[in-house]
Image (tube, helix red, strand yellow):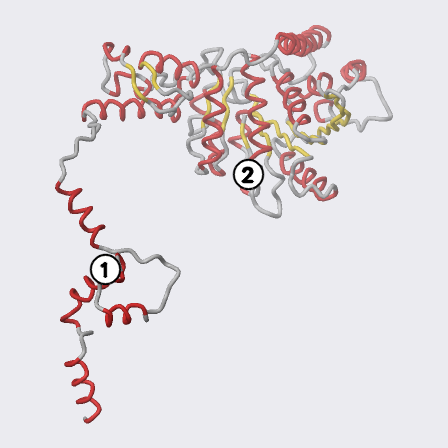
Amino acid sequence: MQQNKAFDDWLASTALGGANQSYIEELYESYLSDPQSVEESWRKTFDSLPKTTALEQPHTPVRDYFRRLARENHNEAVTVIDPAAGAKLVKVLQFINAYRFRGHLEANLDPLNYYRWKVSSVPELDYRHHGFTEQDLNETFNINHYVYKRDTIKLGELAQMLKETYCGSIGLEFMHVQDMEQKMWLQSKMESLLDKPLFTSEERVNFLRELTAADGLERYLGAKFPGAKRFSLEGSDAFIPLMKEIIRHASRQGVNDVVMGMAHRGRLNMLVNVLGKKPENLFDEFAGKHSSERTGDVKYHQGFSSDFAVDDKRVHLTLAFNPSHLEIVSPVVIGSVRSRQTRMNDTEHSKVLAITVHGDSAVAGQGVVQETLNMSNARGYSVGGTIRIVINNQIGFTTSNPNDTRSTEYCTDIAKMIQAPIIHVNGDDPEAVAFAARMAVEYRNLFKRDIFY
């Protein structure tokens, strides 16, 4: 009790009480401005305060500045966006995204017009669906590099460019991919299609040469052995320049070994025109000539291995032997690639590439495809992505009505279970085929994920 009374007496006698806070603050600010302006006893008190590295500043001038600023009239220009113009811009962005999401549905992918039963019109791809009129086509919008790296663009020009990009000979399904980096890369790559020319004259002549070789072999086999079963590549001749372009582009990105698996269709053409099997050996098989080097299996089950020249290096190619059971070779190829990567200590999955080739009915109908896809990103089975090519001759082997082939829009819809992008290409456009081939290789090598073609 005595101690508390002494403390109370001290509080009553000292100037350092809460009631004097404002007075002491004013004294201290005067001291900061000019130490000689305060009475000597206070100056000694302030001098005895602990020193810090921070610079002490009077608060009064700061408070006075903001009070004065609040009283002043400000004449700075303020940009006000017209609500109607803002709403129009939102519709423009929705129009762009409509093509990114659904442009593939109106892409020129059907050279035979076989799927005329499908609904060909997608309302979202019409500018009128978004509330625009013909008068709006000449209006310029500030899209701030949202598409085609343009700051501004007229609606009419935008509509034409989007149609050429997303509804041409390539239809890209990629908006189901959740990874933003992958999605933006695919979007940028697709929208570079308008950067012409895509290929040099020399490359175009080379594509023509490869198409001619593919077509010539099929014509010869059809004329020489008209009754023999050969699972012709006719109608999908672009498969040969496609495979060669994938191998060339992969080699230039560091791939040394390519392992492939495919079913019957186009296999004989692949053996001769890609892997380099001698045509006379193939003709002997058609003629039934015996060879002690062959297994006796049918010619469209045969595998092969060879070296493929690319610039100044060679890439080793392997085509796995194939049974008649559709798609069963796919997991065999993946296992072969994984073992090679382990043997080469290829932990980055950059030296060995897996390519599997499917038929349109088999890829959707055979369960082993989905089983293999399910393991594609698992640590114990991943090979850093597989390029999966579907040769679509637009009819299943035993199906006459396309309505009876499947329950989905495309045979490749199973790819969405692992968020793999899907490139649809019209085989009658060799340059589109080659562009998509390079795109598939670059995506696989960059993101180490499967991609469907």
Q: Is residue 1 above or below residue 303?
A: below
**Within the image, what quadrant is residue 338 found in?**
top right
Kind of residue at disc 1: Glu
Q: Mark 2 falls on what kind of element?
A: helix
- Residue 389 at x, y percent in the picture: 58, 26
Residue located farthest toward the top when viewing the structure as drawn: 223
The reply, left or right, for residue 434 in relation to residue 49 is right
Label located before the other in sequence (1 or 2): 1
Residue occupying image coordinates x 77% and y 19%: 277
Kind of residue at disc 2: Leu
Q: Mark 1 falls on what kind of element?
A: helix
Rate crowding at label 1 as few (under 14), some (14 to 19) or many (20 or more) other CA atoms within 10 Å. Answer: some
User: Do tag 1 and tag 2 residues touch (Cβ < 8 Å)?
Assistant: no
- Residue 387 at x, y percent in the picture: 59, 30
Q: Nearer the viewer, residue 278 or 182?
A: 182
Q: Is residue 299 above or below residue 182?
A: above
The reply, left or right, for residue 62 in relation to residue 115 is left
Q: Nearer the viewer, residue 339 or 34?
A: 34
**Within the image, what quadrant is residue 445 found in?**
top right
**Within the image, what quadrant is residue 135 found in?**
top left
Say the numbered circle drawn on residue 317: none
Q: Number of callouts in the render? A: 2
- Residue 132 at x, y percent in the picture: 24, 16
User: In this figure, which residue is indicated by the disc labeled 2?
Assistant: 373
Image quadrant containing the N terminus: bottom left
User: In this figure, which residue is indicated by the disc labeled 1?
Assistant: 29
